[in-house]
Image (cartoon, rainbow, N blue to C red):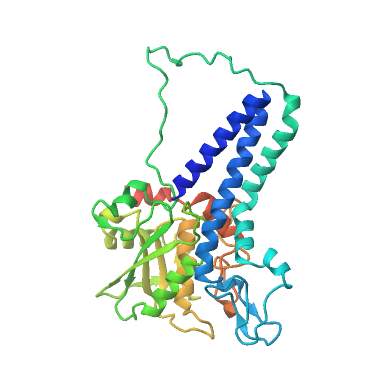
Amino acid sequence: MYWRQTLLSSLFAVVVGYLVSTQQGNLFVGIGSGVAVYIALRVMIATFFRTRYWLSRGGHKSQSRSCPNCGQYIRRQSGNWILRCKRCGWTAGFPILRWFYHSVPVVQFRRSLGGKRLLLLVLGLVLMVSAPTMGTFNFDTDLGGPTDTDGDGSTDEVDLGGPTDTDGDGLTDEVESTGNVDGYPLPEADQDHKDLYIRVYVGNGIEPLTDQEKADLREIWADMPVSNQNDAEGIDLHITQVQLSQTITAKLSNESLRDQEEQIYKQRVPETAQCSVYAVVLVDATGDPVISGRGASPGYVSIVDGHATQRYNTEYTVRTTIITHELLHNVVGRFEDGSYHTSEGWLTRTPGEHGTQFYMSDKTASHLSENGFSESEYFENEVCG
């Protein structure tokens, strides 16, 4: 879907740019026109698909609020174009004007336009307006023949790089198109949408994740505002749970768990799936103070207190929130400013405190949208190599 949208927009942009360049006799006017057309088409297409996607799904839990009229806790429901209270009928915004600010298409248009696309659109328009002063473009320019930089009698080779990972989830397009990595199955893999495959190892004496906890985890990750090449947001979480016959104890307050992480990962995760599949280990946590979880940042292992099944007046169990927190450490690693945590959202140091941080911060969403999942040189070279 994504490459078709890109190809269609690119073709229109090239045609418009060429026609404008030939008619105006100015290369820069043509480039500006092409950039403006490309961005406009991409935004229109992205807005259409995002609107269709989010109209059917309803709003984020992080966007919920109390009704100012009756106090009912509400969020936009599937099929609603605008946030509306079912109890009293209150609707967000002013009549008529609400359609230009609060409606799903307008919200998705703003998100589709974004900072980078808006900047490129402005750049294209600036070129169109100011380019006539930059001179003309001569189509009779001699472009020369093939280049042979090294003088070996052959034209310069093009470096095509390594395997392609379109969606940035650490799984190559080839792996996701075949649905397995060296024979290890990756069901429902999508090369245009980020997939996160985890194996949850349950130590002896620990209650396995319930169906509700697994459903909560899938919903949490699906609701994350992380962009994908198919213009749908979220990360698809795929869970495999394995019951162990032995007890696993971990002192999570240690400064480093690298040796234990490596031992657990190499011993538990099938060799063919290593550095493609993430391990979440539910353990008996010890230490003073007792810490609920630790995760490699970045890496492929999260160690979580398996007994933390309490809810504390929130909709998620503690271990559900800790698994989400530690898995984000795995895939985010370190931010550009060198930090591992954020001031809000799932990656705060206390995401479950009073149930106030159950959402993805803009900082985390932007990092994952732009960079994809972080690779771990340690795991790639020392553990999986």
Does 134 sit above or below residue 271?
Answer: above
- On screen, 152 above or below 212? above
Left or right? Give the position of 9 relative to 384: right
User: With respect to residue 98, does 125 lie above or below?
Assistant: above
* Direction from residue 180 to residue 256 in the image, left or right: right
Q: Position of residue 57 (x, y in %)?
A: 50, 70
**Residue 37: image location, x then y, percent:** 61, 41
On the image, the x and y values in percent for residue 353 come to 58, 77
Residue 225 visible: no
Observer-nearest of 284 and 330: 330
Is 280 situated above or below 174? below
**Residue 75 seen:** yes
- Say which residue appears at 53% left-offset and 59% top-offset: 50
Return the residue nearer the eye: 26 or 22: 22
Q: Residue at x 42, y 30 (%)?
A: 159
Viewer-closest of 28 and 347: 28
Q: Which residue corresponds to the image point at 52% horizontal and 73% vertical from the top-left? A: 78
* Residue 196 figure quarter: bottom left
On the image, which quarter does residue 150 sit in?
top left
Q: Nearer the viewer, residue 183 or 291?
A: 183
